[in-house]
Image (tube, coloured by chain):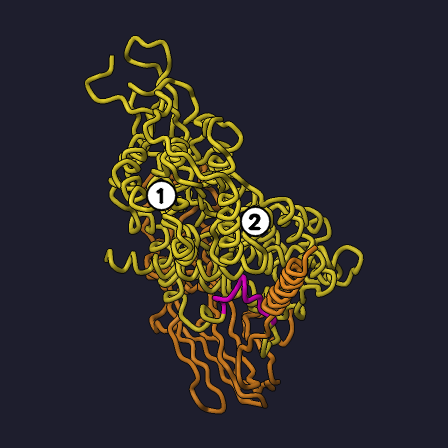
Amino acid sequence: MRLHERTLERAARRVLAALDAAATRVYGSAHNPIYQTGTVAVAMLLVLIGTGLVLVFFYRVGTPSTSVARLAADPWLGAWMRSLHRYATDVFLIAGALHLLRMFAQARSWGPRAIAWVVGLMLFGAGVICAWTGFVMAWDTFGERLARDGARLLDVVPIFSEPLSRIFAGDGPVPSAFFFVNLFVHIGLPLAMGAMLWLHVSRVARPTLLPPKRVTWTIVGALTATAVLAPATLGPAADAFRLSRSTPLDLVAAWWLPLSERVTPGTAWSVALVLAIVMFLVPRFMRRPREQSWAPSVVDPRLCTGCNQCPQDCPWDAITMVKRDDDRPSLVALVDPARCVSCGICAGSCAPMGVGPPGRTGRDQLAALRDDVLPALALASPAPIVAICCAQAPSSHVAAVRARGAYVHAVTCVGNLHSSVIERLLRDGVPGVIVCGCPPRDCVSREGPKWLVERLFNDREAELKARVDRRRVRVATFAAGSFGESIAAFESFVRDVNALRPPVRQADAELDMECEPVPFGEET
Amino acid sequence: MTPGTIVRWALAVVVSAGALLGMVRASAAPVSLRRVESARLRLSWSARPERIEVCRTLSAAELAQREEHMRQRVECEGRFATYLLRVESDGRALHQSIVQGAGLRHDRPLFLIREIDMPPGAHHVRVTFARRETTDNDAAAFAGATSPDADTGLFAGRAQREVIERARRARAAIPPRLELDTTLEFLPERVVVVSLDPERRTLRVLTKTP
């Protein structure tokens, strides 16, 4: 079972990497829309609500197909507004599906993220039902087909006193009440989706709800232009006495319809239920033991000065400051293991190195440096440039950097990196340190690259000390599909470092005392 | 702007336009439903199934033992009828099924919806919907029965009300046998609906929404 789980995850990661690489090649890593799928979906939800509020004023439950046909024929407002509404639906569903894929592939579906995964699935399901009811509202042949299949599926569930399918049989007009209820669901669900969205991001600090403005307006503008130039098709009005040989079908929103129509309602329900159960149980299947690289952060109260930085930097609101139980006058950090995803951002945020996942605190990073990295570097003469690379960085990029003479030191996330590690490397005679992180919008720890830059260059707490020569430090983005740019950034750094005077080794110099580990039993 | 930037911009525009075009196409992809130009016969109606009951008139002594508000003259026990639906076209059986009332106890109205694909053209169609139970229905026999005992006191006129109620139930129930035997013209890609006329209590043919 576990083999299958990881195999699936690997396959998903491969698919995602290919998509990311393709999109980065075209749009660049800063504007890659595939990185922004969650926020693009939210942006589309806002577009849907905005356009829907306008469209609902023109919709008549008594004459649904006529009112929508009138809208579609109005070139000034109705046609493009309706088309934008429909295209935004498609983009919402595509972005939602890609967002699910990303979360699954990057193992971001379990543990403290399980709630976000489950609610995300519910959001996606609500989006599908919203799309379903929206297409039915138009009451063209496609809407009728969706309504018939929906009724056929619901008729096997004994909740209605009369089979819904009879509504569309033709022995009487389709009652306005049906379209009213359909409209009610279509409008009511987005309200529920708002609440779900709040729950979806309730466990993250500073949730990013929208893509960068440039990406948002480009997508909205492109969709509006498409809506004007190629308005969405409206099929012939529904007629219970006419059989269509073909229907204009929205394959994005209703790709499943031709399959569902070919099987019995029982089979369709069974497949849907099994799929839903499997999807909802993904957090259960994908969870890892909370140890080693997945262990939650711990606080060493002897080192914690109560500076309140780690709660501010934690992207998951997993740290709070509480009263100490000793006689020191400050507060002490407390990690909630149920919320901690073991990203290690807190380790990078703690100047005295008192917090972090086991084995990845600042002290552990310095210890690893002393034990493994510095001895290896000492063998090389002259000392090479050190590339500190995120474990998620594309292997091709990392291999290329290594091939160009850099010593590669891997970290789980660049946000995990304590600035003292860089200082220690430079003091040990390393000519330069380049930190290779993920694109800011694709960081599995959410805010790793952001806090790294703030700490290295903008004096955010746990900052790289002023005495460190910033010309020997650089941050680069390593993203799939940006090989040329990444290597160019590295080579440019190498050129800049080579232009400087050779570094002076200060291996015996001490780092700030605040960064030194306090040996057990020696604290006062 | 460097040539590389211009190329990237152009590539982004082309790829975006292609993706949007793909989405426009996918949002209205003509997906075929059937290969041949068939027509369809749709049977659709709902009705209350007949209740098959054994009834008896309570004697004056029996009635006297009951509380005054419980003195129902005729007591019936039974179950709801089931029906055999049979559809033939040009003498060939197309469909046969048993239809009964909805609900776990089958005491709700029956709802019928069946769709049968037909080749276009004129066809002699025979639809029968017949009660399967052959036993006599006492409730119908008692529909007009009145008790010889006089209604007095607080519940005066009750025997008459019971008669009216039994008659109403008998009228509301579907007739023991419905039959449609006619030639229908099936046009390609069109639907002919056979439904129940609630006024005439007979099957009727519809080719457009009434």
Q: Quadrant of residue A238?
A: bottom right
Give the amino acid type for the residue marked by disc 1 in the picture.
Thr
Which of these two is toward me, A67 or A439?
A439
Return the residue at label 1. Answer: A412
On the rendered image, what quadrant is the N terminus of chain B found in? Answer: bottom right
Q: Residue placed farthest to the right in the image?
A: A76
- The span picked out in magenta is A248-257
Q: Residues within 10 Å of mark 2 (few under 14, many from 20)?
A: some
Read off the chain for label 2. Answer: A
Q: Residue placed farthest to the left in the image?
A: A521
Q: Residue at x 33, y 71 (%)?
A: B135
Q: Residues within 10 Å of mark 1 (few under 14, many from 20)?
A: many
Give the amino acid type for the residue marked by disc 2 in the picture.
Ala
Q: Residue at x 38, y 53 (%)?
A: A402
Report the chain shown in yellow.
A
Count of marks overlaid on the render: 2
Horizontal and vertical percent for residue A36? 53, 49
Image height of A433 relative to A151, above or below: above
Read off the chain for label 1. Answer: A
Horizontal and vertical percent for residue A69? 72, 63
Horizontal and vertical percent for residue A165? 51, 64
On the rendered image, what quadrant is the C terminus of chain B found in? Answer: bottom right
